[in-house]
Amino acid sequence: MFVDLHLHSTASDGILSPSRLVNKAKAKGLKAIAITDHDSISGIKEALEEGKKLNLEVIPGIELDVGDSPQEDIIEIDILGYFIDISNKSLISIIKKMNESKWKQKKETIKILQKYGIKITEAEVLKEAKGGLVGRPHIARVALRNNPDKFKDYDSVFKQFLIYGQPAHTDRDFELTMKEAIELIHKAKGLAFLAHPIAYIKVKNLHNLVKKFKEAGGDGIEVIYCYRKNKPYIGVPIDKQNELIEIANQLAEEFNLLKSGGSDFHDPKTDIIGEVKVPLEMLEKIKRKVYSSSSSPSSKSS
């Protein structure tokens, strides 16, 4: 029996609504999933309700963006939160502040793209987001659709403009440090996991990053991950993906961290829900830590 603990819906930059995402996971035969939208919990209630109807366990989660700190070798890092309390006032307040800052940042990104002659407007990006939070994927999709003469594919928009160090990548005026992201998840009674660690190719010393994560109170690492269908390792052979997973596994073992895994699903075109086989036992170990400090485990999942 398998689970997928890294899925995105229209509440952030995914293509499927939370309920459609739950239905797709059920059709794949999964026993449980985690909804982990970027800096958003707005899709969780819908997913929980659909999960109850279909008898599929849905774990309330989130993927928090961490502010870049090159001097600390922390660049484009994400922290996953599992079993979070979505009614937690601190979580709601900070997410609201983060997303106000995020939209301000994305408007600046759009302005920069326009200065470079890219055909794109705020209205088009908002429409692409379908009422969810605007992220770089929404900007990339619009830019690609409107400018086929400038971009050969979706990834080229990122490489030319949107990734760290490129002209349209801008900082936010409010960002969380890695320690703050971990602390926020803990305040919301959840566990904090370092997302897809081997994907951080701009980090010079991954071992030190995991050490800092552990020292900051981190609980686990996303060990199993669909690297061959996600940036920056798209298209690598399955043997190479297994090597990357093993590196993450060894880091988790060395630092005595819990393990999780997931597909990082965004778009049904890739159809990767459940592609990497994350055993149910991995989730059960996470639950044991969650429930060891909670007298009401039923309030944390459906």
Image (cartoon, rainbow, N blue to C red):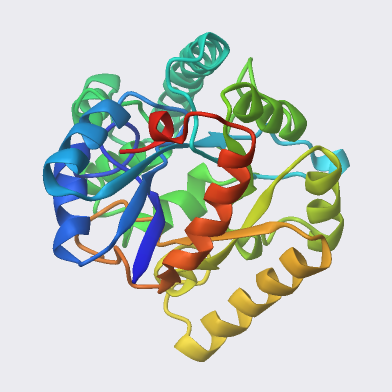
- Residue 228: image x %, image y %? 44, 74
Q: In which quadrant will I find the C terminus?
A: top left
Tell me the quarter of the picture where residue 291 sits. top right
Q: Nearer the viewer, residue 189 or 299?
A: 299
In the depicted structure, whether residue 113 falls above or below residue 137: above
At a point 34% along the width and 52% down the height, the residue shown is 33
**Residue at 58% over, 41% down:** 290
Residue sitting at the far front: 295
Residue 222, compared with residue 119, is above or below; it is below
Whether 187 is drawn above or below 53: the answer is above
Image x and y of residue 252, in percent? 72, 64
Position of the N terminus by quadrant? bottom left
Residue drawn 70% across and 27% down?
A: 183
Question: Of residues 59 and 264, which is closer to you in this image?
Answer: 59
Q: Position of residue 66 (x, y in %)?
A: 65, 34
Query: Residue 114 falls in which quadrant of the image?
Result: top left
Would residue 77 appear left or right of 280 to someone viewing this image?
right
Res 168 seen here: no
Q: Nearer the viewer, residue 39 or 147?
A: 39
